[in-house]
Amino acid sequence: MSRAQDRDQAALAGQVEALPDKPGVYVFRDAGGHVLYVGKARSLRSRVRSYFQASRQTGPRQEVMVGQVADLEYIVTATPGQALIVESNLVKKHRPRYNVRLRDDKQYPYVRVGLDEDYPSVTLVRTREADGARYFGPYTQSHALRDTLQALRAIFPHRSCRRLVARDRPCLNHFIGRCLAPCLGTVTKAQYREMIDGLLLLMSGRDDQLRIRLEERMLQAAEDLHFEQAARHRDQLRSLEAVVDGQEVVTTSLRDRDVIGLAADPAHACAQVFFFRRGRLVGRDSYFLQGAVPGDEGEALSAFLAQYYGLAAEVPGEILLSLPSEDQSLLEEWLGGLRGRRVRLRVPQRGEGRRLVDLARENAALALRERRHRRELSPERVRQDLVALQAALNLEDYPHRIECYDISNLSGQDAVGSMVVLEGGQPKKADYRRFRLRTSGPDDYAMLAETLRRRLQRRRVSSEADSFAVLPDLVIVDGGKGQARAAAEVLAQEDLAGIPVFGLAKEAEVLHGPGDEATVTLPASSGALFVLMRLRDEAHRFALAYHRRLRAKRLVQSELDHIPGVGPKRRTLLLRHFGSGRKVREASLEQLLTVPGMPRPLAQRIYNHFRSQVAAPPPISQCPKGESPHGNHR
């Protein structure tokens, strides 16, 4: 029913009332004929009618969708399970705006074991067919899957060629022990199939059965005096242990089951699937969903189950969920038909099951956050954010090159300044610079001014290829209005007053100009603010790392000066030999004796000095109470 266009509402209402009371699939279309939503139902009439009832409680998203409906179609199916399959296929075909769907368009890879062949091959494929082969998957991490298959070939040297053709000499894989070379006829079908059976056991998570088989064969071969064959089985056992050792037994139940946790943000959702086989975690995958919104997690989970297990090569007997899904009984019936036996969908409330689904949900949230972080850092996204920053700060030019400055010191000692550069939306680490400052006293403004002045003065003696010769389009300093004003004064003294400068204050995360103009507050969700915060934090990290290194060197040097027999030359030799003051302090007596020209009595004296101190100096990352290691961060 459309509110925005002249649509015969009575005709649409008549269509709804004429729907049969049977299972099937319904399709909502807008006035332009585009598919808005595809749904399934045990009763088409009851389900579709509920969308247009005034008493129905819906979210804003569904209200907008219903307001755009101008036409509907339906398909009657024999069973609700068939409706689930048809819905999944139509969602994949039309990609409706209001449906939850797997984000990636491509088919996920499967591992295909060609049991229909005399000498089964093991290959990666993108589609699963009813051809008598055994399939495993689908998997989302194709690169990791290829690495796993390479490791398995060391245990089970199977063929990887697409067609088995008789040859006069074997390929390289046979010479390096990665193929039994059935193309030469050196292995019988029974022997090759025995090896493939072991591979199937491991892929199915039955490694305990595989261990027993290999141990029995190893002992039998040794008893028959076939020592080379026994050695091969021994090597297989060792390789198997290396592959399986990373799989932790985290459940007391020995049944096969999948554990699924769902996390959603305003844009997407992620389903994390843990695969448990006989109590062992044999793998996990993350699947990203598009069209899911917070508040509709049950619908998103139901859509994921239908789409994922419609592709899956294996359905376990139990599936643990982090929250209830819509149409749970329908899904259980459909999944049972796929498996050939009963499948239980369960939402555990306590105990081990609850711990597992919480773990899956936490991993889904982490995967979603990581994906969002990668998207925020993409070059194209950063360029868009910088365009928004240009508008927010009212800049005349696009900020192609942004330089950010920070200082770090402890009560004026070991003061350093840092310069980091963002160019073209990406960090340009080759242009990062550090300055050991000469300003005396803990004067934040003067130290910042010295850092910027020395950077700008270098441009006068730099060649065109030098990074100092390139002027920034925008200067950001770590601090508030005072720091921004100090930087603006230096720019004016260097006849560069046209370069805009802002201070980004921590905690409040607002931008301060050098003058009396109002501060600029960007929304917390602003990508432009995120870019500047990341740049500011990078400048802080770069300055603090240099400050800590200088302070550590000074502390150790002063301690070495108090050891009789250690003069300036010996101190320099020690620092060069060990690379840092911390390593001198931690060196053993034997290590000290490796220093060229180091007599044993002096080495013993240095060793005793650092071990006999009553109170060790505070770690470099700690400071006396009331002081900060960097003057402009209180």
Image (cartoon, rainbow, N blue to C red):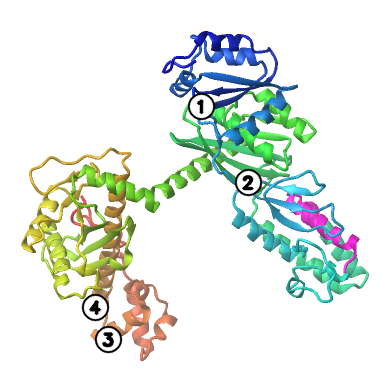
Of the two numbered discs 4 and 1 on the same chain, state the one appearing first in sequence: 1
Q: Which residue is mark 1?
A: 296
- Residue type of the residue flagged with mark 4: His
Q: Residue at x 71, y 52 (%)?
A: 111
User: Residue 426: horizontal and vertical position, in percent?
Assistant: 34, 57
Marks 4 and 2, how far apart at CA: 70 Å
Q: Which residue is mark 2?
A: 107
Residue 629 on the magenta span: no
Mark 1 near mark 3, Cβ–Cβ under 8 Å? no
Marks 2 and 3, how far apart at CA: 72 Å
Q: Can you tell which quarter of the image residue 216 is in?
A: bottom right
Residue 565, labelled with which disc? Answer: 3
- Does residue 535 lie above or below 102 as drawn? below
User: Residue 325: horizontal and vertical position, in percent?
Assistant: 60, 27
Of the two numbered discs 4 and 2 on the same chain, state the one appearing first in sequence: 2
Marks 1 and 3, how far apart at CA: 75 Å
Of the two numbered discs 1 and 2 on the same chain, state the one appearing first in sequence: 2
- Residue type of the residue flagged with mark 1: Asp
The residue range painted magenta reads: 187-211
Q: For the residue labelled by badge 1, is the local secondary structure a helix, a strand or a loop?
A: loop
- Residue type of the residue flagged with mark 3: Gly
